[in-house]
Image (tube, rainbow, N blue to C red):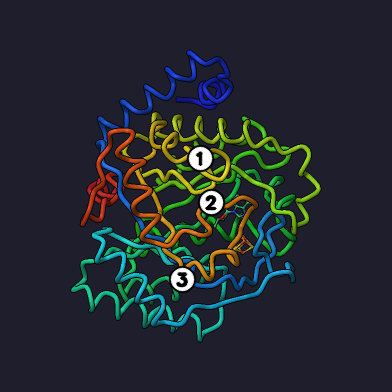
Amino acid sequence: MNKKEIISLLSIDNEAELQQLFDKAYATKLQYVGKKVYFRGIIEISNICIKNCYYCGIRRDNRELERYEMDSEEVIEAALWAYDQRYGSIVIQSGEREDSRFIEKITKILRELKSRTSGRLGITLSLGEQKKEVYKEWFDAGAHRYLLRVETTNEELYKKCHPADHSLEQRITCLEALKELGYQVGTGVLIGLPDQTLEDLAEDILFFHKHDIDMIGMGPYIVHNNTPFNRFKTTTDNERNLQLALKMIAVTRIFLRNVNIASTTALQAISPVGRELGLKAGANIIMPVITDIKYRLQYLLYEGKPCLDENADQCRDCLENRIRSIEEEIGYNEWGDSHHFMERKDRE
Ligand code: 5AD
Ligand code: SF4
């Protein structure tokens, strides 16, 4: 697929053609990765962030927010809960931090979790840009996947969405370092950013291909009131962005075939069945939030984030029902590694 073809698929807006696109993506998913959905229980361990992305609710300059950091025991308890529920893996996510106390804390948590589950719990990290040595330390301690969204691959748009000291180039350097170290590498973009074009989104998909990305997490951009991008509140069209996000999932599936694609929580912030729609459009991963309810309001990246008052047990039951409703299965007790990663390793 070339850029023109991708743009033309992203432009579809008639019902029948849209359905065809989603059906084709679904068939591609069945052929290359199967019908199973894999759960990654996500633990949002801290909302402290040194970055100041203009769109994000937990950006450094948001003073309206109480900052928290879970202690190691709380993280381990949540992770072991997920393990007991037979979730094959977890994701440890946080605002970006670079202090050595934090880095060491993560290393210790990783070692402890690996030892307490005899290496069986899969662990993904989503802890922002770090030095290569830090990524290595965490890899050696037991993490094997890393998520770092590029947010957008258009340099100019990146600059519009971030302060001058945030750099797209640095992000890409980090993705390359992660790959070199042997991680399964995930990235993704925000969909519907102010002034973002279909051409930009097509370039994003080509970027995933060019960089041999194993896992993709994309979601609609949603306004958070307490951010500089609040000024785009009246021009941000959530319904359009939801549709566009589903089309991005579908086209990415058709084009990249064997990658893992997440049906993200942000889809559900716009529609109550957003995540089911994501699975129907070609996604195969769900990341149930297992962060304790007492922290959830403090980890509000955007307005309308769902499930703020549902504990991890309720989320699990709710998701099981949703997945049953679309006749898919859950890959319990499996890591559900990206087929693309295995293919890439064979190639190397
Ligand atoms: N709307 C949607 N997603 C957002 N994120 C941050 N702010 C928003 C927002 N306003 C996403 C970013 C980041 C991930 C953790 O959350 O893409 O990588
Ligand atoms: Fe921090 Fe990530 Fe939010 Fe940017 S998007 S402010 S790095 S948590």
Residue type at the position of mark 2: Pro
- Read off the residue under disc 3: 132
Rendered view: 99 above or below 265: below
Q: Secondary structure at mark 2?
A: loop
Q: Secondary structure at mark 3?
A: helix
- Labels 1 and 3 touching (C-beta < 8 A): no
Mark 1 to mark 2 CA distance (whole Å): 9 Å
Q: Quadrant of residue 259 in the image?
A: top left
Question: Which one is earlier in the sequence, the residue at label 1 or at label 3?
Answer: 3
What residue lies at 69% left-to-right and 48% top-to-bottom? 223
Q: Secondary structure at mark 1?
A: loop
Neighbour class for label 1 at 10 Å: few (<14), some, many (≥20)?
few
Neighbour class for label 2 at 10 Å: few (<14), some, many (≥20)?
some
> What x and y, as percent, mark residue 273?
47, 37
- Read off the residue under disc 2: 306
Residue type at the position of mark 3: Lys
Residue type at the position of mark 1: Pro
Between disc 2 and disc 3, the foreground one is: 2
The quarter of the picture where the N terminus appears is top left
- Read off the residue under disc 1: 272
Farthest bottom residue?
A: 101
- Labels 1 and 2 touching (C-beta < 8 A): yes
